[in-house]
C-alpha cells in the first residue's frame, strides 16, 4: 500500500507541477527550473515505487527511460540554441520525457504538438482581433496582442503529458490493482 501511495503522490506532483508550469508560462513566459526538477524527482519516486512495489508497469526498464530523456534533451537543447523554443520548455519537456519512456513518447509528442497547434491558432486570432482590453504587462496575452509570435508551450507540454499518462495506463485500474496484489 505504501508503494501505491508513493506512486500516486509522485504522479499527482508531476501533474500539479505541470499545471503550475503552464500557468507561469501564461503569466510571464517563463517556467521555473524548480518545476522541471520537481517533475524529474517525482519520476524517480514513481519509478522506484513501481519497481520496489513489485509492479513495474507502466515503466519497464530504467535504461529505456534514460535514453528517451537524453534524446529529448539533445533535440530540445539544439532547438533552444536555434531560438525555436525556450530553455524552460526544453527542461520541462525533457523531465516529462523521462516519465514517458519509449512506450509513451509518441503519444506525448503527438498530443503536445496537436495542442501546440491549436494554441498557435488561438494566438493568431488574438494577435489579429486583440479581444482583451486589460492584460497583465509581460503576460502571454500582452505579448501576442502587441504583435509578438510567442506560445506558452508549458501548456501543450502539460497536455501532452496528461494524454500520455492516461493512454499509457498510469492511472489504470490494472496498475492500481497490481500494487494491491503485490502488497497482498
Image: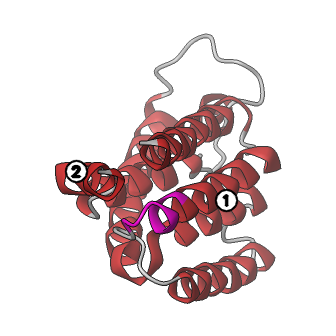
Q: Does the magenta stretch include residue 52?
A: yes
Tell me if mark 1 has few (under 14), some (14-19) or many (20+) residues whose alpha carbon lies within 10 angstroms of its own.
many
Q: Nearer the viewer, residue 61 or 82?
A: 61
Q: Which residue is drawn at 60% across and 30% down?
A: 141
Q: Residue at x 66, y 47 (%)?
A: 148
Q: Nearer the viewer, residue 47 or 146?
A: 47
Q: Residue furthest top?
A: 134
Q: Which residue lies furthest to the left in this view?
A: 173
Q: Mark 2 points at which residue?
A: 177
Kindly report which numbered mark, 1 or 2, lies closer to the viewer in this rendering: 2
Q: Which of 72 and 118 is in front in this view?
A: 72
Q: Relative to residue 144, is residue 54 drawn left or right?
A: left
Element class at badge 1: helix
Q: In this picture, which residue range is highlighted in magenta?
A: 49-55
**Which percent across, then down, holds residue 143?**
68, 37
Q: Residue at x 42, y 72 (%)?
A: 59
Q: In this view, does 56 lie above or below 36?
A: below
**Which percent across, then down, holds residue 110?**
34, 69
In the drawing, what numbered circle is on residue 40?
1
Distance between the Cα atoms at labels 1 and 2?
25 Å
Whichever of callouts 1 and 2 sits on the residue coming sooner in the sequence is 1
Q: Is residue 102 magenta?
A: no
Q: Which of 148 and 40 is in front in this view?
A: 40
Element class at badge 2: helix
**Which percent across, then down, holds residue 127?**
52, 38
**Which percent across, then down, holds residue 33?**
81, 50
Q: Residue furthest front?
A: 184
Q: Which colour scheme is used?
A: secondary structure
Q: Relative to residue 174, is residue 87 drawn left or right?
A: right
Q: Residue at x 55, y 46 (%)?
A: 10
Amino acid at each position: 500500500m505504501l508503494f501505491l501511495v508513493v506512486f500516486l503522490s509522485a504522479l499527482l506532483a508531476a501533474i500539479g507541477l505541470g499545471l503550475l508550469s503552464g500557468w507561469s508560462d501564461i503569466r510571464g513566459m517563463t517556467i521555473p527550473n524548480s518545476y522541471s526538477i520537481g517533475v524529474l524527482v517525482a519520476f524517480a519516486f514513481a519509478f522506484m515505487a513501481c519497481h520496489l512495489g513489485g509492479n513495474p508497469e507502466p515503466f519497464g526498464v530504467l535504461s529505456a527511460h534514460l535514453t528517451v530523456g537524453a534524446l529529448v534533451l539533445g533535440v530540445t537543447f539544439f532547438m533552444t540554441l536555434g531560438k525555436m523554443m525556450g530553455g524552460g520548455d526544453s527542461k520541462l519537456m525533457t523531465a516529462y520525457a523521462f516519465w514517458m519512456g519509449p512506450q509513451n513518447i509518441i503519444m506525448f509528442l503527438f498530443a503536445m504538438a496537436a495542442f501546440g497547434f491549436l494554441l498557435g491558432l488561438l494566438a493568431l486570432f488574438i494577435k489579429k482581433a486583440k479581444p482583451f482590453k486589460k492584460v497583465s504587462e509581460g503576460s502571454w496575452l500582452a505579448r501576442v496582442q502587441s504583435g509578438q509570435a510567442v506560445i506558452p508551450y508549458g501548456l501543450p507540454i502539460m497536455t501532452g503529458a496528461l494524454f500520455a499518462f492516461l493512454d499509457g495506463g498510469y492511472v489504470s485500474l490494472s496498475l492500481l490493482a497490481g500494487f494491491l496484489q503485490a502488497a497482498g
